[in-house]
Image (cartoon, rainbow, N blue to C red):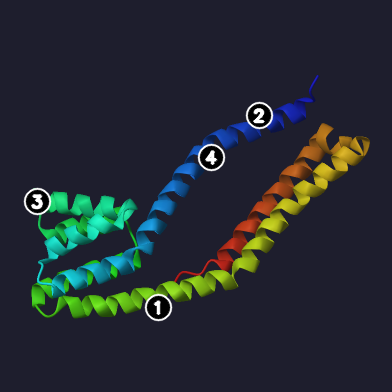
Amino acid sequence: MLNPYILGGCSLLAAVLAFQLPRWWLRKRIRRRQQLFDARLTDLTLGIANGLRAGAALPQSLELVSRDMGGPMTEELALVLHEYRLGMDLPESLNRLCERMPGEDLSLLVTAIKLTMQSGGSLAEVLDRITDTIRDRTQFQDRLRTMTAQGRFEAIAMASAPLLAFLILYFLDRQLMQPLVQTRLGWCAIGAVVTLETIGFLVINKIVTIDV
């Protein structure tokens, strides 16, 4: 017969996983889609600028670019153009794009397009400068991510070390670990360790996560 403390702990863990795993999976899919979209922003700005220089209007340039992009970029641009054909102003449709795909680079691009449409000027030249800005920001973020990789690894190692130590000791000498899993005090100690490890992991992860 299973120990009631072990059964209760397993039930609690299963409930937490059942609640969190779908949310984690959905957030991961959304984040991945956002990353794929952001990775093509420089191609988008270059494509629009080239289309404008070739004599195409902005909506036509967006349509030409969307055909070659693929993935989330094509899907989002197709929705922008669909809204535009249904009568929505292009700036408003671009604002809705920013709401669906939030990001500083896209916001900068949309703001530049709207201001240039209002005040006039060469949108192609503005897009060239934005392309350089986005490219520089992306390169800096990549270097920063590489520099903070060790900190993220240390956070994962710190969080997983107690669990690995517990499993090793449990399988090597179960009698030694019985008081930890069969008494209320033992489970309180496990709960305290899990809480402190979680706090430590979140703190380290927050420190090494730098917004640019």
- Answer yes or no: is residue 205 visible: yes
The numbered mark, 3 or 1, whose residue comes first in the sequence reads 3
In the image, what residue type sits under mark 1? Asp
* Distance from Cα at disc 3 to Cα at disc 2: 54 Å
In the image, what residue type sits under mark 4? Gln
* Distance from Cα at disc 3 to Cα at disc 1: 34 Å
Residue 203: percent from left, percent from top: 61, 62
In the image, what residue type sits under mark 2? Ser
Dot 3, how many residues are within 10 Å of its Cα: few (below 14), some (14-19), or many (20+)?
few
Answer yes or no: do the residues labelled 3 and 4 have beta carbons within 8 Å?
A: no
196 or 165: which is nearer to us?
165
Disc number placed over residue 20 in the picture, else none:
4
* Distance from Cα at disc 4 to Cα at disc 2: 14 Å
Residue 142: percent from left, percent from top: 49, 71
* Distance from Cα at disc 4 to Cα at disc 1: 36 Å
Toward the top, the furthest residue is 1
The numbered mark, 2 or 1, whose residue comes first in the sequence reads 2
Circle 1 is placed at which residue position?
136
Callout 1: SS:
helix
85 or 196: which is nearer to us?
85
- Dividing the picture into quadrants, the one containing residue 145 is bottom right
Callout 3: SS:
helix
The numbered mark, 3 or 2, whose residue comes first in the sequence reads 2
Residue beneath the point at 88% across and 35% down: 178
The numbered mark, 4 or 1, whose residue comes first in the sequence reads 4
User: Which callout, 4 or 1, points to the residue nearer the camera?
Assistant: 1
Disc number placed over residue 11 in the picture, else none:
2
Dot 4, how many residues are within 10 Å of its Cα: few (below 14), some (14-19), or many (20+)?
few
* Distance from Cα at disc 3 to Cα at disc 4: 40 Å
Circle 3 is placed at which residue position?
85
- Dividing the picture into quadrants, the one containing residue 1 is top right
Residue 54: percent from left, percent from top: 13, 72
